Image: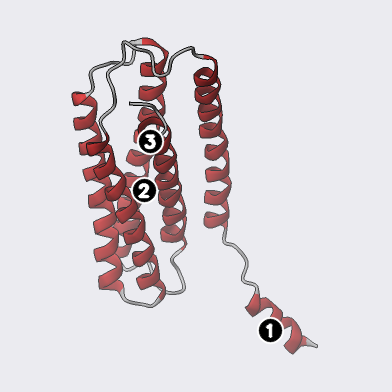
Amino acid sequence: MSDVTTQRERARPEMSGPVLGMVLFVASEAMFFAAFFGGYFTIRANAPVWPPPDVPHLKIDIASILTVVLVASSVAVQLSLRATRDGRRRQALWWLGATIGLGVLFLGLQLYDYSQLGFGLKDGVFGTLFYVMTGIHMAHVIGGVVFLALVFGQGLRGSLSPTHHDPLAAGAIYWDFVDVVWLCLFTTFYLLTPR
């Protein structure tokens, strides 16, 4: 009977505390962003013209590059996690460093995109929603870059291994969430907003 119990334990590994904590945190953040998207679509549905005529049209070129950069960074963090699980430390660190670098590139490009827009935070409800929603996302990207940089430091010290990689797994969950939120923002503001 103990052999059967042991086999069941091996077949269903428990979720670690750090990973469970990140899953719960991401779930709460998903509700936070859902409230903003709900507000946006409610305001949009009740507006006679959307976006308001005084708002310059959003250009999709830089936003498309931002999307490619962030999706590539999610692929990189997953490759880092896989390499860590396989015991390939050097490749894991390389991919994690690439993720962090792409995150920093995303932040720089988003700031550049902000500088090219012809409207500001105080320019009506569209401007407010755009800057608040993308700005909160930017804050999450900054948090993710810092978190992954700390995990990178752990990797440099040899603290990540095939049996101990929960910090990286938690960071990957968070980073993929940040990516999904950006895809929703990109779709909402750049693809679904008439130009």
Q: Which amino acid does label 3 sit on?
A: Leu
**CB under 8 Å between discs 3 and 1:** no
Q: Distance between the residues labelled 1 and 2?
A: 35 Å
Q: Distance between the residues labelled 3 and 1?
A: 49 Å
Question: Of the numbered discs in the image, which one, if any, rests on residue 191?
Answer: 3
Image quadrant for the C terminus? Answer: top left
Residue 100 percent across, percent down from the top left? 27, 51
Q: Is mark 1 on a helix, strand or loop?
A: helix
Query: Residue drawn 37% across and 45% down?
Result: 144
> Viewed as shown, does residue 172 lie left or right of 2?
left
Say which of 61 and 140 sits in front. 61
Question: Of the numbered discs in the image, which one, if any, rests on residue 147?
Answer: 2
Q: Looking at the picture, does residue 38 appear above or below residue 67?
A: above
> Viewed as shown, does residue 177 lie left or right of 69?
right
- N-terminal of the two: label 3 or label 1? 1
**CB under 8 Å between discs 1 and 2:** no
Q: Looking at the picture, does residue 79 appear above or below residue 2?
A: above
Report the number of numbered marks.
3
Image quadrant for the N terminus? Answer: bottom right
Q: Which amino acid does label 2 sit on?
A: Phe
Report the colour scheme. secondary structure
Q: Distance between the residues labelled 3 and 2?
A: 30 Å
Query: Residue drawn 35% across and 28% down?
Result: 135
Q: Looking at the picture, does residue 53 appear above or below residue 93?
A: above
Is residue 156 shown to the viewer in this render? no
Q: Residues within 10 Å of mark 3 (few under 14, many from 20)?
A: few
**CB under 8 Å between discs 3 and 2:** no
Residue 104 percent across, percent down from the top left? 24, 44
Residue annotated with mark 1: 7
